[in-house]
Amino acid sequence: MARILIAIVVLMLLSSCSKNEKYELQKYYRDAYSPAAQIMGGTYAGVVETFNSKAACEDMKREVEADDRRIGYDNSMFICDIKGSKKGAHLPRQWSFSSDMNNSGSVTITDVGLWSSWLFYYPGDYLIKLLIEKTPGVSGFFDISTSWYGKKFSGAIGGVLLFFSFLAITGDNE
């Protein structure tokens, strides 16, 4: 029985190691109010190309960014992301509050949900930012990057702070 369990674990590990992910070079517009973003209906412009490795995607990213610099175009932002992942999931965090969080041009009910999400994840995202900037060795070792913004780690930090805030507000003041 133990041999069967070991064999299953080994097969699971091997299958996860051999996962061949594709990467997409995605284009975004920095200025949501630019004519290009208005035509596209938002900051997401689309997939430039798909690659078999992250290294190839990063190489192409450097090329297209250099092309944009060469022609003086500064409204583009390119992100290498796993194919099929949520669009914009790895975009840098918006640090300043904006009433129009989704850059739709008007404040809607969608923005209200984005306000609470922005506030909830802020402490954890800020801790990630500090780790990346102040301790690059530690953040590099643990693969901490801006792709962690708004994910489980940030949520855990936000949840703990929310819990202790709740305790402080509702606790006995004797």
Image (spheres, rainbow, N blue to C red):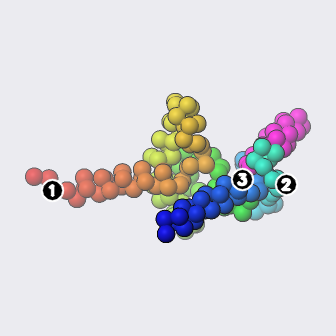
- The Cα–Cα distance between marks 2 and 1, rounded to whole angstroms, is 59 Å
Q: Residue tagged by mark 3?
A: 81
Q: Which residues are magenta?
A: 58-81
Q: Residue, x 58% and y 63% (percent of image)?
A: 7
- Closer to the chain start, of discs 3 and 2, is 2
Q: Is residue 17 magenta?
A: no
Q: Residue, x 52% and y 30% (percent of image)?
A: 134
Q: Secondary structure at mark 3?
A: strand
The nearer-to-camera label among 1 and 3 is: 3
Q: Neighbour class for label 2 at 10 Å: few (<14), some, many (≥20)?
A: some
**Amino acid type at mark 3:** Asp
Q: Residue, x 82% and y 45% (percent of image)?
A: 56
**Going by the image, does 8 lie left or right of 52?**
left
**Amino acid type at mark 2:** Glu
Camera sees residue 144: yes
Q: Residue tagged by mark 2?
A: 49
Above or below: residue 128 compared with residue 23:
above
Which residue is at the front of the view, 144 or 100? 144
Q: Neighbour class for label 3 at 10 Å: few (<14), some, many (≥20)?
A: many
- The Cα–Cα distance between marks 1 and 3, rounded to whole angstroms, is 48 Å
